[in-house]
Image: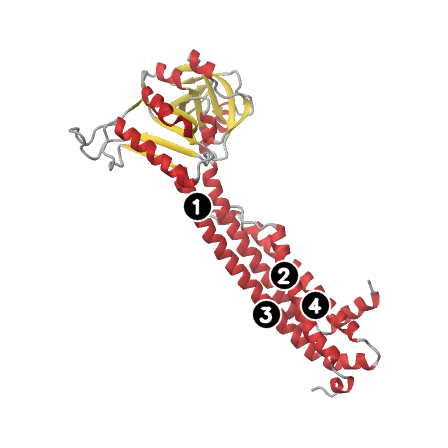
Amino acid sequence: MFSLDRWIEIFQTIRKNKLRTALSGFTIAFAILLFTLLFGIGNGLKNTFKREFAKDSMLSIYIWTGKTTKPFKGLQSGRRIQFKNDDYKFLVDKFGDRMQTISPRIQRNVQAIYKGEQNNYTLRAVYPNYLVLESAEIESGRFLNMLDLQKRSKVIVIGRLVEKDLFGQLSALGKEINLGGISYRVIGTFSDPGGDNDERYIYGPFTTVQRLYGNKDELGEFGLTYDPKLSVDEAIMFGNQLGKALKEKHSVDPRDQGAIRVNNYAEGNKQVSMMMLVLNLIILFIGIGTLIAGVIGISNIMVYIVKERTKELGIRKALGATPKSIIGMIMLESVFITTISGYIGLLIGTTILKFIGDSLEEYFIVDPSVETYVVVGATIVLIIAGTIAGYIPATRAARIKPIEALNDD
């Protein structure tokens, strides 16, 4: 039950013992401050990993070619491997049951011109399902479709920053852009969580680019996503099987790492998951250590506070105060100081993270922040600790006889 007299008494005690109160509050505030900063920086590192993987689907596998580095089956090293259209059919027929999407890709550097504006970009010739690999989102219009491929239409989808570069504040939809001397109509624009570079790509129908630029049967690389039902280890094995099958088809030594290369995001996911687990354990260990230090500090201070007030408590008992009222007063003071100090520590910690957040990006820490429930939970732990720390010595003090308390040195 709320008692105004009790709160007046608590504030009077705090005013009379400013140094003691300040030391108690500093211990708690500093513990919460450290806890907030540690978890904030830890979350910043997690955000860095998430941002790096945001540019592509987490289920992605990319396959491209190079030159052989080993002789094999009578063929010399240094042979250039070239993917062709039948490789696409080969992969679909052999591994289609474990693939979610697959798209061949051709890349060309082109000069884009629209009226007086021009710039250089990368033109990617892809299938419609390639959008899934990039985790891109259509901002206006639409992406490529199968009809565009069948008709070999001269249409393109441009990134948000391509539109900004060439059209300023105007919409690019329906406009004609000259790419390397060939006119294409803009049918859509997209944004990409991967950042500025990914928003300066231009996408066109795979069949159109193959026909117009002379590579009627050749392609550059493959991008695909595997079945999300596959475990990480199964996905890694699947990527290895893809590389092995293509090496067999193109007569490449299985040990040759340069001729056909497979970039499987599942391998990175596994490494990142392990790193995140270790990082979480480290942060948790340090965070618990910080809280334990805070708990010990609160306990020591509360023992000292009760010891210092032994005579005062004796006088209260002599004047008729019950043990319950004495215990309640000490515990309420402890909880009040812990709560206010914890909030101050939280406020300072979140302010520091917000102030230095942008400057930490060069150290691979992106948007350092901490969930409110985590810090509130830590503060509650300290409040409980402060309550227990105040209850034990307060109970002992409440049991002491008034005459013994008054004679205490």
Image quadrant in which the N terminus is located: bottom right
Q: Say what amino acid the circle numbered 3 marks.
A: Ile
Q: Amino acid at mark 1?
A: Val
Compared across the picture, whether 13 is left or right of 348 comes to right
Q: Which residue is mark 3?
A: 296
Q: Nearer the viewer, mark 1 or mark 4?
A: 1
Kindly indicate whether the residue at mark 3 contacts the one at mark 1 (C-beta within 8 angstroms): no
Q: Is residue 223 left or right of residue 25?
A: left
Disc number at residue 381?
2
In which quadrant of the rendered view does residue 255 lie?
Answer: top left
Residue matched to label 1: 272
Q: Is residue 164 above or below residue 344?
A: above
Element on which disc 1 rests:
helix
Q: Secondary structure at mark 3?
A: helix
- In space, the residues marked 2 and 1 are separated at their CA atoms by 31 Å
| Residue 199 place in picture, x, y as percent | 47, 30
Residue at far top of view = 151
Image coordinates for residue 324, horizontal then vertical, percent: 78, 72
Q: Position of residue 133 (x, y in %)?
A: 45, 30
Q: Which residue is mark 4?
A: 334
| C-alpha gap between disc 2 and disc 3 | 12 Å
Upstream in sequence: badge 2 or badge 3? 3
